[in-house]
Image (tube, grey):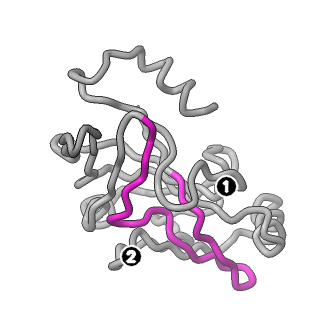
Amino acid sequence: MLEVRSTGHLRSNGKTLHGYAAIFNSEANLGSFSEVIRNGAFRKSLESDSNIRALYHHQGDALLGTTRGGSLKLKEDAHGLAFELALPDTTHGRDLAVLVDRGDVAGCSFGFRVAEGGDRWEERGGQLVRELLNVDLHEITLTSDPAYTDTTVALRSRPIVLAVLDPRRMWLETCL
């Protein structure tokens, strides 16, 4: 099951977008728990040969670039998961450039799966906290409606001890 998180850091310089798809060490309150993405959480994905895509609003048919094609560059720095995206000369690319310049699109998101042992849950002062330590990154997304201005959007998985939910229900809840 793919998980999605959002952030509000995006800027343009003509036909290239720069920003952060995730921010490290910033605790985000997701309601029933808080979540923190730790430095290095994306390292294995970035070092692998996987093809990470840049999309508009998580829509597969709105492809903006890929790491394999070289139009999307990703790196971890001290602040988070930084990206540089050379926008394509397509309807989506041209429209997105205008929307970013106007400030209508200012957010980012990313889709991922948690690798085996890639998260840690603990209780701190009565609040559950999830630390993301190693995730399998599938996409970054540019969006006009990030759920949060820092990092995080919706829960896609929970440990069995917390709740047993139908995965289809969890997917729908993250889309609302």
Amino acid at circle 1: Thr
Q: Residue at the spot x=56%, y=53% of the render?
A: 148
* Quarter of the picture holding the C terminus: top right
Write the start and end of the magenta stretch as one range.
6-31
The count of marks equals 2
In the rendering, at what x and y percent does residue 89 appear? 77, 70
Image quarter for residue 97?
bottom right
Q: Amino acid at mark 2?
A: His
Give the percent coordinates (x, y) of residue 41: 28, 60
Q: Quick one: SS at disc 2?
A: loop
Which residue is drawn at the image coordinates 63% and 61% (left, top)? 107
Distance in Å between CA atoms under marks 1 and 2: 20 Å
Label whose residue precedes the other's in the sequence (1 or 2): 2
**Residue 115 placed where, x, y %?**
24, 44
Vertical order, 111 against 89 (above or below): above
Does the magenta-highlighted stretch encompass residue 8?
A: yes
What secondary structure is the stretch in magenta mostly built from? Answer: strand
Q: Residues within 10 Å of mark 1 (few under 14, many from 20)?
A: many
Report the side of 122 relative to 93 (left or right): left
Element under label 1?
Answer: strand
Residue ID for mark 1: 143
Q: Is residue 108 above or below residue 34?
A: below
Q: Position of residue 170 (x, y in %)?
A: 47, 24
Q: Are marks 1 and 2 in contact (CB under 8 Å)?
A: no
98 relative to 159 in the view: left or right: right
Looking at the image, which residue is at 50% across and 70% down?
20
Task: Return the residue at label 2.
Answer: 79
Q: Magenta span has 16?
A: yes
Taking depth in this image into account, of 120 and 84 the one nearest to the observer is 120
Foreground residue, 61 or 13? 13
Instruction: Decide: few, some or many residues near mark 2? Use Cα within 10 Å; few <14, some 14-19, many ≥20.
Output: few
